[in-house]
Amino acid sequence: MNKKFTPKLPLLLLIVFTVLLPFIPLFLWSLSEQWFYPAILPQKFGIRAWHYIFFTTGEQILDALLASVSVGLTTSIISLLFGLPAGRALGLYHFPGKKFFSLLLLLPIIVPPLSTSMGLHFWFLQLNLTETFIGVVLIHLTFCLPYTIFVIWGVFTDFNPDFEAQARSLGATPLQTLTRVTLPMIYPGITVALLFSFLLSWSQYLSTLIIGGGKILTLPILLFSLMDSGDRPVASAVSLVFIIPVIVVLLASAHSLGRQGFRGNR
């Protein structure tokens, strides 16, 4: 039997095909010059859309891409810094008001984003946070932080603090216990929490538009404006540019989690 062919291979190919299938029309649209119903394929191919986003508006798209990455990374890091102690407290300890606090965390998720953004917009105006990078990060934290806390909460539900106590009894300092015991044990949860926060921040459009006021130009805002213009080839090309960093982050996270799992099984 050929070792290269395993029962998992057809399933893997099916998953890859299913994931890539929605991107095929986007790719065809980005290379189309003419595509009218009922033609299955474009009647005329060209690179006008790619030339437009790389040469005509290349600087604008690059600025929007950098803004999206900066906001996403900043939001993810701050969300983890606050979500880690909160998730640990919720996962390890029982205290009065725990259920009420859990309900408060759910409110930004349950309430429609438009209502949340419009309500906070009033307070951000008073604090001069509108049309600023900090204001956009704070509004993104409103939606990202609850997810981070819930993920870390689940991680610490199965965490045994006796490992930390053993490390301390053997002479480890609090910092050594954190870096050599706690963080390696919860590394997969941290990776998932960062991934959730980054992807959620990356895809924010409405809250960024309301708080940013058009001054903070991220890739979703640019993408929606191109979609409204009716130029489908250009919008499709920008959509692919918007998706590529997300795929890279997902693959890197999956690879990192996979290697962590292999190390843990040894």
Image (cartoon, rainbow, N blue to C red):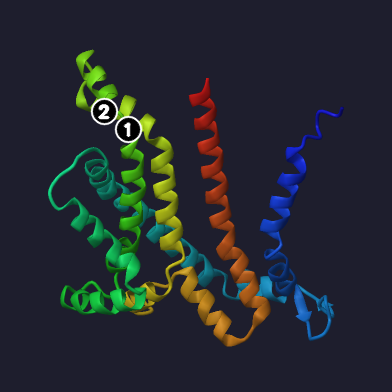
How crowded pointer 1 is (Cα within 10 Å; few <14, some 14-19, many 20+) is rated as some
Residue 159 badge: 1
Which element is circle 2 on? loop
Left or right relative to 244: residue 193:
left
How crowded pointer 2 is (Cα within 10 Å; few <14, some 14-19, many 20+) is rated as few
Q: Position of residue 224 (x, y in %)?
A: 52, 78
Q: Position of residue 157 (x, y in %)?
A: 32, 39
Nearer to us in this view, 83 or 134 = 83
Residue kind at label 2, given as amino acid type: Pro
Quadrant in the picture for residue 38 = bottom right
Residue at the spot x=27%, y=47% of the render?
Answer: 81
Residue kind at label 1, given as amino acid type: Phe
Q: Position of residue 87 (x, y in %)?
A: 27, 45
Q: Which residue is mark 2?
A: 161
Give yes or no for contact between labels 1 and 2 (Cβ–Cβ under 8 Å): yes
Q: Position of residue 58 (x, y in %)?
A: 57, 70
Residue at the spot x=68%, y=65% of the render?
Answer: 22
Quadrant in the picture for residue 212 = bottom left
Left or right relative to 11: residue 87:
left
Left or right relative to 109: residue 5:
right
Residue at the spot x=35%, y=44% of the render?
Answer: 154
The quarter of the rendered structure image containing the N terminus is top right
Q: Is residue 176 visible?
A: no
Q: Is residue 235 above or below residue 87?
A: below
**Outermost residue toward the left in this view:** 96
Which element is circle 1 on? loop
Q: Is residue 136 visible?
A: yes
